[in-house]
């Protein structure tokens, strides 16, 4: 297995690197709030969202081939493993975090096997119809899961239909202040996406909410905040799990593997064609494997080649992995010096950010395109989306 390192950075030129570095700053301003929000879907401690864009991002820049792919936390894979692991351990507990790390390591192992046997071509066999329906279903599932946090209502259930029931059963907990803040954040982000897509509305919302929360003592007023966030570098340790737990995790790891292969390969191919670049799919699979191994040993969770974050990087002007390395450098600075203020961040703000991500996952345009091509394919996509909502990922 021949290694070609730093393919996503070469050839380097000063002018291009300067542009990419600036794009990395813009990318960080838009993506840091998102990766913090993804921890709500993953049921992981908030700081682990930052861990997903540190070592994993660097690992893919070293071993991967794509100049554009952003490898980080992803809503689809987070929804896959959180739904499977929460029955095995309490969400956010030490045991849960250990199982998530082992899952990332197993996923890395499956990706390594795929690289050794050159199985990157498998992505070509995944039906666009099913993938569109699946991601749309995940969008509905994640959006419904966030409603409780946006309304100040406890929704302890893990199943979507049960969460809807929790909203009605615990409706007496509804908090007008929490709802008002959530509505403000959601409206601002959606309007920003529509009229100023390159402006970091989510970052402004996070910074503004932190400042106002610290000044007005939101927690004392009944608005839940995320609390203390540990700073510093992530601890490097090997994930631990029993043989029985590893066997139980394998089907979930296989599901994450399929999603990663599908999304990452499709995203890399789109941008390679757009910029007329050569792409080594096997190198990308290796890069994704090493990125997930890095996530496993640094306390993060499964990472994926994110279509939305890659699109953000492209719109920011990024044309090589230099942008992603700058992004990782800024995240390192946040971990070392700026985690203190995060303790004042209202939980409803994170839930609102994730809700807007879920809205973006509902691919209305893609479903319309499928309907124009074939009613049967459209019904298959709708059935897949419904299965995710009613049965589970």
Image (cartoon, rainbow, N blue to C red):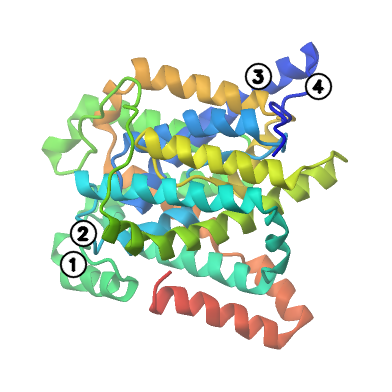
Of badges 1 and 3, nearer the viewer stands: 3
Which residue does the image show at 66% across and 81% down from the upper left? 378
- Spatial CA span between label 4 and label 1: 58 Å
Q: Which residue is mark 4?
A: 11
Q: Which residue is mark 1?
A: 171
Between 249 and 166, the one lying in front of the other is 249
**Mark closer to the chain start, 2 or 4:** 4
- Spatial CA span between label 1 and label 3: 47 Å
Give the residue at the far bottom of this rendering: 376
Instruction: Report helix, strand or loop for mark 1.
Output: helix
**Mark closer to the chain start, 4 or 1:** 4
Give the residue at the far top of this rendering: 14
Q: Which residue is mark 3?
A: 21
| Residue 88 horizontal/vertical position (percent) | 24, 61
Which residue does the image show at 69% across and 52% down from the upper left? 265
- Spatial CA span between label 2 and label 4: 52 Å
């Amino acid at each position: 297995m021949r290694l070609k390192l730093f393919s996503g950075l070469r050839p380097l030129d000063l002018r291009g690197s300067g542009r990419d570095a600036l794009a990395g700053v813009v990318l960080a301003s838009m993506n840091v709030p998102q990766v913090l929000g993804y921890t709500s879907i993953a049921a992981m401690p908030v700081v682990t969202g930052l861990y997903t864009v540190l070592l994993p991002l660097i690992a893919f820049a070293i071993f991967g081939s794509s100049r554009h792919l952003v490898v980080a936390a992803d809503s689809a894979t987070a929804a896959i493993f959180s739904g499977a692991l929460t029955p095995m351990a309490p969400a956010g507990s030490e045991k849960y975090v250990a199982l998530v790390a082992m899952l990332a390591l197993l996923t890395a192992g499956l990706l390594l096997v795929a690289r050794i046997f050159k199985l990157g071509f498998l992505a070509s066999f995944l039906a666009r119809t099913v993938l569109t329906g699946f991601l749309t279903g995940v969008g509905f599932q994640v959006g419904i899961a966030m409603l409780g946090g946006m309304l100040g209502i406890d929704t302890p259930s893990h199943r979507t239909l049960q969460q809807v029931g929790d909203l009605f059963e615990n409706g007496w907990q509804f908090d007008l202040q929490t709802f008002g803040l959530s509505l403000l954040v959601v409206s601002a982000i959606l309007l920003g996406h529509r009229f100023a897509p390159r402006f970091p509305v989510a970052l402004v919302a996070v910074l503004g909410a932190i400042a106002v929360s610290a000044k007005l003592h939101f927690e004392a007023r009944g608005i839940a905040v995320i609390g203390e966030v540990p700073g510093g570098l992530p601890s490097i340790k090997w994930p631990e799990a029993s043989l029985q737990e590893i066997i139980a995790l394998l089907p979930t790891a296989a599901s994450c593997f399929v999603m990663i292969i599908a999304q990452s390969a499709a995203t890399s191919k789109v941008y390679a064609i757009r910029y007329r670049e050569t792409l080594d799919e096997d190198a990308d699979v290796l890069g994704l494997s090493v990125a997930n191994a890095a996530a496993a040993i640094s306390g993060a969770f499964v990472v994926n080649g994110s279509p939305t974050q890659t699109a953000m990087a492209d719109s920011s002007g990024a044309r090589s992995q230099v942008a992603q390395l700058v992004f990782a450098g800024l995240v390192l600075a946040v971990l070392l010096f700026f985690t203190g203020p995060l303790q004042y961040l209202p939980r409803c703000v994170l839930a609102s950010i994730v809700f807007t991500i879920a809205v973006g996952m509902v691919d209305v345009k893609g479903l319309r395109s499928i309907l124009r091509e074939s009613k049967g394919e459209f019904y298959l996509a709708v059935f897949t989306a419904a299965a995710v909502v009613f049965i589970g990922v």
